[in-house]
Every structure is written in structure tokens, then in C-alpha cells.
């Protein structure tokens, strides 16, 4: 799981006001933030094994209904079922230059920041929504590494097709309801074929990759 990146991303909204400060100051402030005592807020118990964020604190109306999107007990969407789309012509995985992939993901990353900072003004809600978003990606990483056999490795084509609806014609963010819930994610899944997963060798390779990722993150955060 991307525990360290998740923590770093959650810090982004809090650290934004520090970006214009000297590097040493930002680093000291970041350390102080990590060591600060936790807020006395706790997600409401919604039954055995479940928690609810909808009424985390009473004066925040934007959180009301947050649980409805994925459902209580399904914060990261990991409990969603999948319906596989049968295609006349299979979608094939095709290798593209890694820099191009990184560029596309960087664009999506910055759009996530734009949505959270322009359309959520409450910092606590920013933190929760970002954690929910990152949690879904962590679930996908587990799927890629075949840590579960419950889900196929693919994407929901109906949800992905709504990307252009995020923006208005003038390029600003749309406020429109796109008429779906998080529980709809997975109902129209396309599974690209052609990846190189090998049951005999890939698990060990993934373990080595995890170790390398951890080392790289440790250097970055030193």
C-alpha cells in the first residue's frame, strides 16, 4: 500500500500556504505538523466494522451524505462488484513511452488538486476526500500486484468517458451533478489484454519493486 505517498498527499492542502517560504522553514514546519497532537475527531461508529464520516462534526454540512457515494463500510470502493464488458474487439495493452504516461498522470494529479482546492473550502473535508481518492488508487495497486483475486485488472469505461464533463466549455470546473455514485464504479469494466503477469515469477518481482519504491521514498523524504 502507498502509505507514505498517502500521508504526503494529505499534507499538500495544509502545506500549500508554506510553498513560498524557504525550504528549511517548510521542512521544519512539515516535521512540526507530523508531530502535532491529533485532533479529537473520530468517525462515527456505523455498526460492526463500519465507520461514518457524514456526521464527523455537526457544523460541517458538506460532509453530510459523504458516506452515500460509496456506501458505509466501503470508504475506498474496494467492496464494489464488477461487471465485465464483453467486447467484439478486445482492448489491447500497448507500451507507450514512460514520460508520456507520467505526463498524463501529472495532469490528472494537478486536476485532483484543482478540484479539491477550488471546490472544497473546508480543510478537514479536503483531507477526507483526498484520502478516499488515494485509497481507491491503493486498492488498484493491490489489484495490479494480484494481492486479491476478487477483482479483475481493468477500468470502468462508462465512468472514464465522463472525463470531459469535469470542465465547462471555458475551461473552468463544472459544478454539475454527473448523475452517478461511487457504487456504480465497476459496472462496466473493460479488461485490456496483453500484460506480462506470470504467476510463477511476478509475485517475487513485485516484492522487490515494493522494496525499491520504499527506498526511493525514504531518500525523497530524508
Image: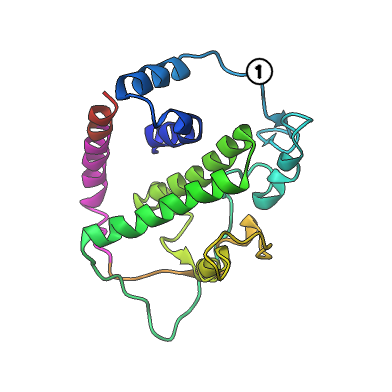
Q: Is residue 89 magenta?
A: no
Q: Where residue 86 sits in the image (x, y, percent)? A: 48, 79
Residue 179 in the image: x percent, y percent? Answer: 69, 65
Q: Main secondary structure of the magenta part?
A: helix
Is residue 211 within the magenta segment?
yes
Q: State which region is magenta.
A: 195-214
Image quarter where the N terminus lies is top left
- Residue shown at the point (66%, 63%) measured from the top left: 180
* Residue 84 visible in the current orientation: yes
Q: Residue furthest right?
A: 58
Q: Quadrant of the C terminus?
A: top left
| Residue 160 position in % (x across, y down) | 50, 67
Q: Quadrant of residue 80?
A: bottom right
Label 1 crowding class (10 Å Cα cut-off): few <14, some 14-19, many 20+?
few
Q: Which residue is at a point 22% across and 28% down the rendered structure image?
A: 219
Q: Which residue is mark 1?
A: 40
At 65% from the left and 65% from the top, the residue drawn is 178
Indicate whether 72 appears above or below 219. Answer: below
What is the residue that sits farthest to the bottom in this orientation? 88
Amino acid at each position: 500500500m502507498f502509505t507514505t505517498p498517502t500521508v504526503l498527499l494529505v499534507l499538500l492542502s495544509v502545506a500549500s500556504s508554506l510553498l513560498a517560504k524557504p525550504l528549511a522553514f517548510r521542512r521544519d514546519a512539515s516535521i512540526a505538523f507530523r508531530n502535532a497532537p491529533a485532533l479529537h475527531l473520530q468517525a462515527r461508529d456505523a455498526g460492526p466494522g463500519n465507520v461514518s464520516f457524514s456526521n464527523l462534526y455537526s457544523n460541517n454540512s458538506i460532509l453530510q451524505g459523504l458516506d452515500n457515494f460509496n456506501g458505509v463500510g466501503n470508504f475506498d470502493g474496494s467492496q464494489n462488484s464488477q461487471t465485465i464488458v464483453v467486447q467484439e474487439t478486445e482492448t489491447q495493452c500497448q507500451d507507450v513511452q514512460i514520460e508520456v504516461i507520467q505526463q498524463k498522470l501529472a495532469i490528472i494529479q494537478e486536476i485532483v488538486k484543482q478540484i479539491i482546492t477550488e471546490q472544497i473550502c473546508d480543510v478537514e473535508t479536503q483531507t477526507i476526500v483526498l484520502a478516499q481518492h488515494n485509497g481507491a488508487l491503493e486498492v488498484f495497486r493491490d489489484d495490479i500486484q494480484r494481492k486479491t483475486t476478487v477483482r479483475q485488472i481493468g477500468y470502468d469505461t462508462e465512468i472514464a468517458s465522463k472525463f470531459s464533463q469535469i470542465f465547462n466549455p471555458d475551461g473552468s470546473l463544472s459544478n454539475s451533478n454527473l448523475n452517478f455514485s461511487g457504487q456504480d464504479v465497476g459496472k462496466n469494466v473493460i479488461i485490456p489484454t496483453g500484460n506480462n503477469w506470470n504467476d510463477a515469477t511476478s509475485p517475487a518481482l513485485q516484492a522487490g519493486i515494493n522494496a525499491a519504491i520504499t527506498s526511493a521514498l525514504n531518500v525523497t523524504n530524508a
